[in-house]
Image (tube, rainbow, N blue to C red):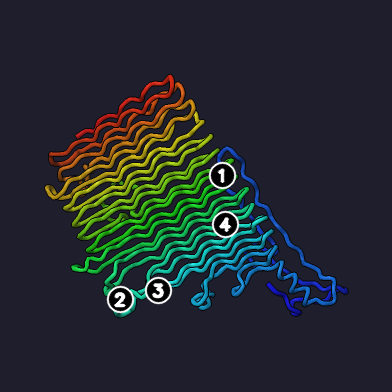
């Protein structure tokens, strides 16, 4: 930021620039508030740190020249010069008021000064422009400040009369990184593609941007952006596909701080083509000294409901072809602290083809002290006339020094085929239990996915339920985890097979193997 003579006034023989710079989210506020990272439950919360800036006095007769010189080192970014002064100041954040300018320019959020300041937010691209979103600016490298958020990607544009696509969806911008102290910026969401009756191309949602890294000493990682939704309503014979965008990865941390959550994959809908859900991304790693891991994003089509009607409502849907839910992301690991939760697999529904639920992500592991997390559940699958396959459950995370039982594997996804004799249903396999800590019992294997036996979506065809997952290995002198129970295969008809119980995990030195899980029932 450059100051001219209009910015300088003479006060008592001194030249004063007032206000010289305002550091923080609001211009001329003169204050920067840094939000501390989230801490594991065993640690107390640290209060925010205020940074204050005072007016700067210039003691010379050449006020304009000195003001310009000071502006080189201290000042906030502007639209045309988004980076802050070299030492102190916040980067410029692009908003909708900058749309006209950003059509012809790359509008990444401005970087902060080296010693203090926040990174600016990147531009969110306008619908149909086909332009890239701006990345978030970096925070102060050697000081305190939060990084800027990435802008949202452009939604696909369609001509108003022909309904032909004029611009593809674009990815969300990446979040900026923090310096020594501060939080990483969140990634922007991917653009959506809601189709058009005149299009000849497949509908594709864009990926979310990755979250930025937290501070080198202290700070949380930024959350990953969500993938963009996709749908296609072009009738046969074109049979256009719809593919949901994947989530952006959660930002990691270095010494102290919580990893950012992974972005969720988007669902998709195609009237006559293939539908594929986006992948949920992994959560960021917690601090190497301490801090919680970030949660993994859910796969496209995720719902926690066991009702097949909800799989049509929230899941990945295809009219005449196949449908596949997106896999869930893994939870981020921790050193001392709680590991990150796993993302669940997306559900899938098809009226005319195969349906497959997405696999659940693996639960994060605590590498030194703290609990690992349960594996994510596999997504459910329903088809009117086709084959169905529930998603596999994710594996449970380990915990090296925990005295508690290790985390369980995730449950396999449910499955159903609605019309008798038209297809077969297969429940998903349960995930493996986590390895026990030094003196801890291994985790229980996840339950196998059952065949749906109630309601309008009850399985009416042949099929087999999923097998239970294997139990985790036990620690010293401790037993292995029990195997997961096999899924039930209850059906109004015959010809269904229940799932087998999983094997127990091996015991640690001086411990016994875990018991096998129970077989499912018919």
Q: How far apart are the two marked residues, 3 and 4, measured between alpha carbons?
A: 29 Å
Answer left or right for 310 relative to 511: left
N-terminal label among 1 and 2: 2
Residue on which the image places disc 1 = 287
Q: Quadrant of residue 377?
A: top left
N-terminal label among 3 and 4: 3
N-terminal label among 3 and 1: 3
Q: Quadrant of residue 499?
A: top left
N-terminal label among 2 and 4: 2
* In front: label 3 or label 4: 4
Residue 128 - label: 3
Residue on which the image places disc 4 = 177
Asked if disc 3 and disc 4 are in contact, CB closer than 8 Å, the reply is no
Residue on which the image places disc 2 = 163
State which quarter of the image contains the N terminus.
bottom right
Determine whether the residue tagged by mark 4 lies in a helix, strand or loop. loop
N-terminal label among 2 and 3: 3
Q: How far apart are the two marked residues, 3 and 1, measured between alpha carbons?
A: 40 Å
* In front: label 1 or label 2: 1
Q: Is residue 450 above or below residue 281?
A: above
């Amino acid at each position: 930021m450059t100051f001219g003579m209009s910015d300088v006034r003479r006060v008592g023989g001194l030249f004063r620039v007032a206000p010289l710079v305002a550091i923080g989210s609001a211009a001329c506020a003169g204050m920067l508030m840094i939000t501390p990272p989230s801490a594991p439950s065993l640690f107390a919360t640290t209060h925010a740190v205020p940074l204050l800036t005072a007016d700067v006095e210039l003691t010379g007769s050449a006020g304009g020249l000195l003001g310009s010189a000071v502006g080189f080192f201290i000042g906030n970014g502007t639209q045309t010069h988004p980076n802050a002064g070299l030492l102190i100041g916040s980067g410029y954040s692009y908003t909708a008021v900058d749309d006209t300018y950003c059509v012809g320019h790359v509008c990444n959020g401005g970087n902060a000064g080296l010693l203090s300041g926040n990174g600016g937010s990147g531009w969110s691209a306008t619908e149909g422009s086909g332009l890239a979103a701006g990345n978030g600016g970096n925070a102060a490298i050697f000081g305190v400040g939060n990084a800027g958020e990435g802008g949202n990607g452009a939604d696909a544009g369609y001509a108003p009369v022909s309904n032909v696509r004029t611009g593809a969806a674009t990815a969300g911008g990446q979040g900026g990184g923090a310096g020594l102290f501060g939080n990483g910026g969140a990634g922007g969401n991917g653009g959506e593609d809601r189709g058009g009756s005149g299009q000849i191309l497949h509908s594709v949602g864009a990926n979310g941007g990755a979250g930025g890294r937290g501070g080198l000493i202290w700070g949380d990682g930024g959350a990953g952006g969500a993938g963009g939704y996709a749908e296609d309503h072009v009738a046969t014979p074109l049979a256009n596909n719809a593919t949901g965008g994947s989530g952006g990865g959660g930002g990691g941390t270095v010494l102290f701080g919580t990893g950012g959550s992974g972005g969720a994959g988007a669902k998709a809908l195609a009237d006559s083509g293939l539908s594929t859900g986006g992948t949920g991304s992994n959560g960021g790693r917690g601090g190497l000294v301490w801090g919680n891991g970030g949660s993994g994003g859910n796969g496209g089509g995720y719902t926690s409901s066991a009702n097949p009607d909800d799989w049509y409502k929230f899941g990945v849907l295809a009219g005449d072809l196949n449908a596949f839910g997106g896999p869930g992301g893994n939870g981020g690991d921790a050193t001392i602290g709680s590991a990150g939760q796993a993302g669940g697999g997306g559900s899938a529904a098809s009226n005319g083809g195969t349906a497959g639920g997405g696999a659940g992500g693996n639960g994060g592991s605590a590498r030194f002290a703290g609990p690992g997390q349960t594996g994510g559940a596999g997504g459910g699958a329903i088809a009117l006339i086709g084959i169905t396959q529930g998603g596999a459950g994710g594996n449970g995370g380990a915990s090296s020094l925990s005295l508690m039982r290790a985390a369980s594997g995730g449950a396999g996804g449910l499955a159903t085929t609605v019309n008798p004799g038209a297809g077969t249903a297969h429940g998903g396999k349960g995930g493996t239990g986590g390895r026990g800590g030094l003196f801890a019992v291994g985790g229980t294997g996840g339950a196998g996915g059952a065949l749906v036996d109630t309601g309008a979506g009850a399985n009416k065809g042949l099929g087999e339920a999923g097998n239970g997952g294997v139990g985790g290995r036990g620690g010293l002198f401790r037993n292995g985890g029990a195997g997961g129970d096999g899924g039930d295969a209850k059906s109004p008809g015959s010809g269904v097979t229940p799932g087998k119980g999983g094997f127990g995990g091996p015991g640690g030195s001086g411990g016994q193997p875990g018991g096998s899980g129970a077989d499912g029932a018919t």
